[in-house]
Image: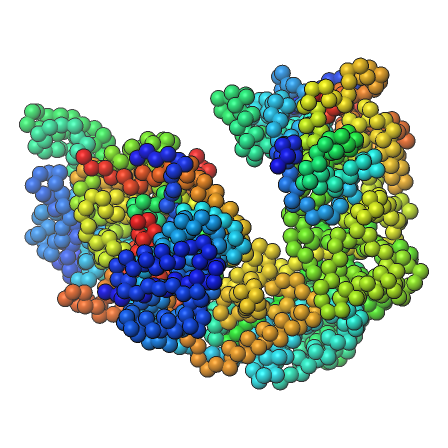
Amino acid sequence: MTYSYYPGCTLRTKARDLDKYARACAEALGFTLEELPDWQCCGGVYPLGTDEIASKLPSVRALDAAKQKGQDLVAVCSACYHVLKRVNDDMANVEDIQTRANNYMGLEDPYKGETKVLHFLEVLRDRVGFDELKKKVVAPLTGRKIGAYYGCLLLRPGKVMGFDDPEDPKILEDFIRALGAEPVVYPYRNECCGGYISLKEKALAGSMCDKIMDSAGGFGADCLVTACPLCKYNLNQSGKLPVVYFTELLAEALGVKEVAL
Amino acid sequence: MQRIGVFVCHCGSNIAATVDVKKVVEMALKEQGVVHAEDYPYMCSEAGQSRIGEAIAQKKLTGIVVCSCSPRMHEATFRKAAERYGLNPYMVEIANIREHCSWIHKDMEEATEKATILMRAAVAKVHLNAPLQAGESKVTKRALVIGGGIAGIQTAIDIADAGYKVDIVEKTPSIGGRMSQLDKTFPTLDCSACILTPKMVEAAAHENITIHTYSEVEKVSGFVGNFTVDIRKKARMVDIDKCTGCGVCQEKCPSKKTPNEFNRGLNNRSAIYTPFAQAIPNVPVIDTDACIKFKTGKCGVCQKVCQAGAIDYTQKDEIITENYGAIVVATGFDTIKLDQYGEYAYGQSKDVITSLELERVMNAAGPTKGHLERLSDGKAPKEIVFIQCVGSRCSDDRGKPYCSKICCMYTAKHAMLIRDKYPDTNVTVFYIDVRTPGKNFDEFYRRAVEDYGVNYIKGQVGKVIPQPDGSLLVQGVDLLDQKRIMKKADMVVLATAIEPNPDVRKIATMLTASIDTNNFLTEAHPKLRPVESPTAGVFLSGVCQGPKDIPETVAQAGAAAVKVIGLLAKDKLKTNPCTAKSDELLCNGCSTCANVCPYGAITYETKLINDHGIREDRRVAVVNSALCQGCGACTVACPSGAMDLQGFSNRQILAEVDAICR
Amino acid sequence: MNKQAELIRQVSGVEPLKCMKCGKCSASCPSYEEMDIKPHQFVSYVQNEDIEALVASKSLYKCLSCFACIERCPRGVKPGALIDAARQVVVRQRGQQYLSADEIPALLDDEMPQQLLMSAFRKYRR
Amino acid sequence: MSVKNEEFRPVIVAFCCNWCSYAGADLAGSSRLAYPADVKIIRVPCSCRVNPMFILRAFEKGADGVILCGCHPGDCHYSTGNYYARRRMTMLFSMLDFIGVENGRTRVEWVSAAEGVKFSETMNSFVDKIRSLGPNVRLGDLRCKD
Amino acid sequence: MQRLIDRAKELLGSGEVARVLGWRKGENSWDVEPAFFASAEELDGFVYDGFCGANLSKYMIEASKLEGKTLVFLKPCDTYSFNQLIKEHRVDRDKAYIVGVGCKGKLKIENIPAKGILSVEGAGYPDAAEMLTVKTLYGDVQVAYKDAMLERCHVCKGKDHMIFDEQIGESADTLDGDRFAQVAAIEAMSPEEKFAFFQAELSKCIRCNACRNVCPACSCRKCVFDSNKFDSAQKANTTSFEEKMFHIIRAFHVAGRCTDCGECSRVCPQGIPLHLFNRKFIKDINELYGEFQAGADIDARGPLTDFRQDDCEPSIVGKRG
């Protein structure tokens, strides 16, 4: 199976690991991530304004490129996934945005949200299957107690993202279990890390991350796993628990960590 | 040629303020066949009706059109009036110029023009009307009540007391319903069982009442006065006549791991069980999904210990067929599932429970023997938080858009009972609005605040956060103080929205009773016919019609019973003459119409037909007008146009179309 | 209707009349205490057309776009979209940027991901 | 025929079943939920009473749009009538589309007795659609002579 | 052909059947018409060859009223119609002795591009030639049998008889086209093009009722267009309802019952492709409600007298594009 792959700008710079591990794991699991040529930055945040078209176009381009190839589009970064998925939803369901974006793009065959956007975790859950994944684990992470940190972007708004139950998600826990570690469920796993606010309001973001870390630590987690570079950055500022990308854990369990780097 | 009279109603100013009624009268007089037209402030009044009578007599009218409110409102009124003055009631047509015209349009010219067109369509239709005679059908003097909760029990007792036979069909092994699960009732704090149990016993002992528990309605056919109902009596595996209700089987049953439905799954029950001690009948059933004998073939302990020899593993479901004149739906409610409300941590913490679960916790026969305990560790909670409107008043698809109506009051009750019995325990209620319309209701709520010190905070809760130490942190705001609240609690109780019993949709479909988008059964009129379904002979009792508390339910149950009694008191009913009729000369006998008839009203006979001199035996469709309900499905299925619907004939509808498109 | 209020309603796609004032948005908001105008009040400010006060509010830059209010609102109101639209109204006016070019270098550190800069720019600047 | 759209007052026939949609229209009325006067309602016992002949006749006589409203599937007063209506209308509309009559001129909506709002919204949107399509010429003119 | 005649004579002679329903030679070799034969002598006029396109099922409605059994010859495609008539109680199975005859494709004289035709050779059965020799006033012309075939034979439903008492003769596969290709092509047109297409075609209609009279599904004792049930009787005016809507209503009335026998188009003197209406319905039924062939199964519920709770909504028409 081959997927179109949208790495996003952070995975090209500060979060190279996230990307490399993802590719190595994909190979190990028998599917291919085919990077879209000439992708542009998704913008990091989904433009909420209904009249914002231009800022959605990079996503539309990526989505249309995947459509041309007849492939599902995979993202690893939570933010990219969020933006792509929501823009895709607009293109499928909001007539005004659809028309205007297509007018800008001047496509011969207008894009109407045909592409399926998947997060790497969804590929693991829905395409590979966690049971199958479990069989491929060569170095189970036995004994490790890992707290899943979802943050906001993967989950909300639940109706559009359709990723998991936005209030009581399971996918990362199932993922952790598949790798042989013990998931630690804690209530702050879907609370905000502060997001972009950490640029100017470090203290506010810090206090939010502290709450998350305290809650996870309180329930016995010895590390946190995330899919988002910004969450990782913010959580690291708090520093109470180590934070790793889910792809790193995966690479470790699949025994491809060394190969990847 | 018809002589038609047109009567235009002002409906006070309801119509006349927007429609120029004089103009409509003027236009009516220009219509072919219209020999009389007049307007009057209230056509439906006694005076208005007698004007119609005068015109019928003086102008020798053969048909009349009343331009007024919806035919759903007054068609029957005007038909009766016409009949009184010697005109066949089916020579009356209504032009709906109120609901469909004056009330929705503002521009007088526009509304008048539309009213004129609607009048013309009705006139065009009346031209083709033919006098119809209502037939008669007998009434089976027996009623069926579906659901054995307090609504069904009360309805059944009231009907039975009037001297008519009633059957109660209850899905679970015992009658009693939701009320049997409650501990106390507001606003008087009576013990629920103490007031319900006597009613249950009364119903069971009543000579006119037959109770079918562990039974479900399987199929309904027929119509008002003449329903035929198949009831599936599920196999109990226990002989109801032999069982003495000693309870030894339940004690000895080795399979005790099934969630106890009656206790909302808070503890377990045996595979052979009666739902609760006061169950009626006090005869257990075997849950064959849980029973070891049924799963593995090895066990049979209950059979061995039963001195009465009542256990019978070979019992099979039995279908009985009964005839009824009336059917009452009293299927009640359940609380909604909370899967989608993860923010309240129900399902993540055992100490977050629903109010109905709290009823069981507080009940002496419940899982904690009536002690207020945390279900996680059995400790006494010192801080309890109640969250209101969980899933009620939600227009998103997670919850229900309506107010569940009972929660404000039962929460006040719970809060008060807890504060009374456990003065050390603090109670906080997060509410959006406190709604207490009802006799002694607001006083009750105020007592909770003033006499019992219950802390009410205005503001919906954002999230319930389980803490590592086992406590719960309730995150909210006090909207009046504009303050963030982080309330530490030992137990959180969710006032979960109620919804109609999920089975009601299936039952409504069988009964052809309408149901709204929230699965509540629709009443025939929201104000004037609140206990009748639009389907004749089907009545509504209790929460299946809309959220209501016990006093309201009992009141409605009595009202439904009165309607049933009124129906059963008649020996014969007039049938709707607007039924399908087949033209034998045109009928091909192809059976297409019978294929789409939902009532099996069409049969075929071979008849000697004289078709313009050609005499031959032909297979032709015959409509049983007692069974036909007049939907018209057959008329469209019929390729030759032989099948037509009286009162809504092809030509009548086409005449309306023509008049509108003219 | 006030032009800016209308603009905010349009850009956000929010119908303030749907709000039943239950306060769940505020109860869910992680930045509640940082805000001068609280999430449940956004709706009233737009409804009352008190846009001047709203756009002057520091709440505009305290909202994290975490969508908790949007997710949990029982009436489908979307207070988060409303405040974002108000912020848009401000940043679309020239010179009304919450993040000036000069202050950026001091805010950066080595670990900071691209994503943070991109999203902060999107939120704070035109 | 060249009628400017703003002057164009379409003729719209709405067939409503007695039990749900007609009651829904009554509720729209008693709730004062306005919709254009262009809509004229014909009461039928059930959506399954509506013969395609009626719809074609309406178009032939000059209707610009025809809408059929019935109980929601599963809620038919006669149990199954609207299921038959649904298939019949799907077939008829598809045929009209096949011969080049704009699909927007025909519509089926399920409106319950409780859905006054939906009734009004449906009629408003249908009238808008018909106004945007302009007068119906095709069905009145399918068979041209000479 | 001789086998058919011999067998018919045998059955007539034994009294097993009272009459034979078949085809009779007309003035020209290609003018063949349905006919009843009451005796062995009359059977001399019997013919069965490539020009016997006529579907005899419908004649069995009248034959069912007569004393005794009627021997009827049915081609494979005709048996669908016969089955459908049984289902609708229009013919009496017990009054029919069905001989299923083989078919190698039927011809349409108009498909032979020649003038002054005198006779056509090679259309005989069972020895149909690959090439027809057409004798004309202007000399002989060679035409491939296939090229002269009826449209319906190119999209043949198959050569199995759905119902029969005995079968005589071999069949040959003639399917080489896509039954729904033309419908699909029209579906792909713009509304303007569709309208123009049908306006042009239907303008040719002279309301001769040949299509109605030949159609085995149009078996009503009295057609709605002849009765006053819909105020539609016998109006010849060109602006009147039924003139315009006749073909649509007719197609609707036979929808779900039409076996796609193609007789309507075969007999239309104006050459209107009337089968397109029926095929459009069949295509829709197949796509929306599942494959259905009227007349294949007597016990199957017709698609328009059936439903599923999760049927598509009528709005699908606009969405299918």
D106 or B627: nearer the viewer: D106
**How far across and down, in percent of the image, does residue E89 sit?**
29, 60
Give me the residue at 75% from left, 57% from top: B434
- Which quadrant of the structure image shows residue E149? top left
B180 or E231: nearer the viewer: E231
Q: Is residue A62 above or below residue B249?
A: above
Q: Is residue A45 above or below residue C40?
A: above
B565 or B43: nearer the viewer: B43
**How far across and down, in percent of the image, does residue B634 sit?**
36, 60
Is A131 placed left or right of E66 in the picture? right
**How far across and down, in percent of the image, does residue D98 sit?**
35, 38
Given the current orientation, which residue lies at the most extreme left position? E137
- Residue E146 in sight here: yes
**How far across and down, in percent of the image, does residue B75 sit?**
42, 66
Give me the residue at 78% from left, 26% from top: A196
Give me the residue at 52% from left, 53% from top: D32
- Residue A195 in sight here: no
**Colour scheme of this structure image?**
rainbow
Give me the residue at 48% from left, 21% from top: A108
Is A49 placed left or right of E51 in the picture? right
Q: Is residue B368 above or below residue B282?
A: above
Image quarter in which the N terminus of chain B is found:
bottom left
Total count of labels: 0
Q: Is residue B430 above or below residue A210?
A: below
- Which quadrant of the structure image shows residue E195? top left
